[in-house]
């Protein structure tokens, strides 16, 4: 069970809790932080001090003061009016990530919510009550208002939730799980929805998957190197040390380790003097992608442990400050950067697939079938990879360069961070499929020229793939086999 403190959650822990259903509990530090900030909010209410979000309207209505006896209604109205998202609903793992990250942010003690409110979210996580949250409708600047409002609906017994794989009313789900719903008090509605947790949950899960893709891109590239008798000299450390790029040096080293002991790799001048760029420049393409992911990890983990609602409560300084921590530009930019990096892993992979299936570019049978004409082999597999790569180019257009004013121009610059995250997820799915196709094609090519020993690392990849994907001598229903290639990347 993971203890929430509000300041030391990692991407891998988010994935364990969101994807693998690890349980959580509040640390004593978090409990103390939450109580302290809530006591300060109640002091403000009792003193009738006017503070944005506590006893005023929201956005353009921030100058309208709300009476003390209407504060609970104010917070409820905020949630039910803002819960107007659209599109397909988020997958369970994203919903869990959103809930977890909101708990973590509230636990830092700068938001002013009640302890019982945070504990209700923790109970929902641990007992598997997952609010139904539409994926579209956030501008990524006043926080992810619409998605987070749908999360809060379940806390107050409104909307819908998934419980034990069944969609039902939130009230029924909470009752079945034995969790009491809550009535929002001053500041709580705004504190729960004004933050970057929807886009951050996507960023965490996407980074984890993209990092795995970056490692499998090397494995696929190395296997293709063997299938095409690639030249090892281009991976000599001397070449990469003088470029000074960390990811490039790591990739070249990794490729050589994967190919260690291979009898299929050649030396410069043995078969040819140079390889095409898609083989020779694997370090120069994969490496910057890894560097991009390394930089993004720092920003994402900072955001995981950030306080991003508004206004912020500083009890020790006796201050309530309206700022802009809800603005998602840092996530929008880094998810756009990741999208471009992951798209390039697919881009170069598809070109390697083309070299495998095209007899003009290899010494292999056309489309990797021993009996061409009667059989089409992997002809259309390359089409599929090309289609996915072309689709990625559309998705890779940055969302973060866009902005549109909202709330009567009070909120006049937005990040479009959630849009960046949704696009990134599609690129990741496409790239997993493209690399899966390359793995299957490379293994097929190797079996068309049997007898020579594979490298230490590539032999593991080949053997693992061959557990579920046989050599294809005659045309078969190909999709399930290509899916096995993709699943190898996702599950390992």
Image (tube, rainbow, N blue to C red):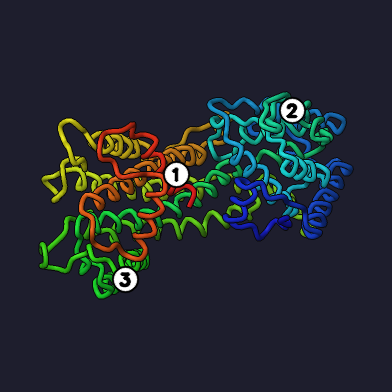
Label 1 close to label 3 by CB (< 8 Å): no
The reply to whether dot 3 and dot 2 touch (C-beta < 8 Å) is: no
Instruction: Answer with left or right where residue 45 lies relative to residue 374.
Output: right
Measured from the top left, where is residue 485 in percent x and y? 39, 45
C-alpha separation, residue under disc 2 versus residue under disc 1: 34 Å
> Badge 2: few (under 14), some or many (20 or more) residues near its Cα, within 10 Å?
many
| Total numbered labels placed on residues in the image | 3
- Decide if residue 210 is on the left or right side of residue 24: left
Quarter holding residue 255: bottom left
Is residue 480 shown to the viewer in this render?
Answer: yes
Dot 1, crowdedness within 10 Å: few (<14), some or many (≥20)? some
Q: Which mark is residue 487?
A: 1
- How far apart are labels 3 and 2 at the CA level? 55 Å
Return the residue at label 2: 170
Image-based side of 476 in relation to 279, left or right: right
Q: Which label number is shown at residue 244? A: 3
Residue 15, image x and y in percent? Answer: 59, 50
Residue closer to the observer: 65 or 40: 40
Which of the two marks, 2 or 1, is nearer to us in this view?
Answer: 1
Nearer mark to the viewer, of 3 and 2: 2
Give above or below for 430 relative to 105: above
Residue at 43% in and 48% down: 488
Residue 479: x percent and y percent? 36, 34
Question: Which element is circle 3 on?
Answer: loop
């Amino acid at each position: 069970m993971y203890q929430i403190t509000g300041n030391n959650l990692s991407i891998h822990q988010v994935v364990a809790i969101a994807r693998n259903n690890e349980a959580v509990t509040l640390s004593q530090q978090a409990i103390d932080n939450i109580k302290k900030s809530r006591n300060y909010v109640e002091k403000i209410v009792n003193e009738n001090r006017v503070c944005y979000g506590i006893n005023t309207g929201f956005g353009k209505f921030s100058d309208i003061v709300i009476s003390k006896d209407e504060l609970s209604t104010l917070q409820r109205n905020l949630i039910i009016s803002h819960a107007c998202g659209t599109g397909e609903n988020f997958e369970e793992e994203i919903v869990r990530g959103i809930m977890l990250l909101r708990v973590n942010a509230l636990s830092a003690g700068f938001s002013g919510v009640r302890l019982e409110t945070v504990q209700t979210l923790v109970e929902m996580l641990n007992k598997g009550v997952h609010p139904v949250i539409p994926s579209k409708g956030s501008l990524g600047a006043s926080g992810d208002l619409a998605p987070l409002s749908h999360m809060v609906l379940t806390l107050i017994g409104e909307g819908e939730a998934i419980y034990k794989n069944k969609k039902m009313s939130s009230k029924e789900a909470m009752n079945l799980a034995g969790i009491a719903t809550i009535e929002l008090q001053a500041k709580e509605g705004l504190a729960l929805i004004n933050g970057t947790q929807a886009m951050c949950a996507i960023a965490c899960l996407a980074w984890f998957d993209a990092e795995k893709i970056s490692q499998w891109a090397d494995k696929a590239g190395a296997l293709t190197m063997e299938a095409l008798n690639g030249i090892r000299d281009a991976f000599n450390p001397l070449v990469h040390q003088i470029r000074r790029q960390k990811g490039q040096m790591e990739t070249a080293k990794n490729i050589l380790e994967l190919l260690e002991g291979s009898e299929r790799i050649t030396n410069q001048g043995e078969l040819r003097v140079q390889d095409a760029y898609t083989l020779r420049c694997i370090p120069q393409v994969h490496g910057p992608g890894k560097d991009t992911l390394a930089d993004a990890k720092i920003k994402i983990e900072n955001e995981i442990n950030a306080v991003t609602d508004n206004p912020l409560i500083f009890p020790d300084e006796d201050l309530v400050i309206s700022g802009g921590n809800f603005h998602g530009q840092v996530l929008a930019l880094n998810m756009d950067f990741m999208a471009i990096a992951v798209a390039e892993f697919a881009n170069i992979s598809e070109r390697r697939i083309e070299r495998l299936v095209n007899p003009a570019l290899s010494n292999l049978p056309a489309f990797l079938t021993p009996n061409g004409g009667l059989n089409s082999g992997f002809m259309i597999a390359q089409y599929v990879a090309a289609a996915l790569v072309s689709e990625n180019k559309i998705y890779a257009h940055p969302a973060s360069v866009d902005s549109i004013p909202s709330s009567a121009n009070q909120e006049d610059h937005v990040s479009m961070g959630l849009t960046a995250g949704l696009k990134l997820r599609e690129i990741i799915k496409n790239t997993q499929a493209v690399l899966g196709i390359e793995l299957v094609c490379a293994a097929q090519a190797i079996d068309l020229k049997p007898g020579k020993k594979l490298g230490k690392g590539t032999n593991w990849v080949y053997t693992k793939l061959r557990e579920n994907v046989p050599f294809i001598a005659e045309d078969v229903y190909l999709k399930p086999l290509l899916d096995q290639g993709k699943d190898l990347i996702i599950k390992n």
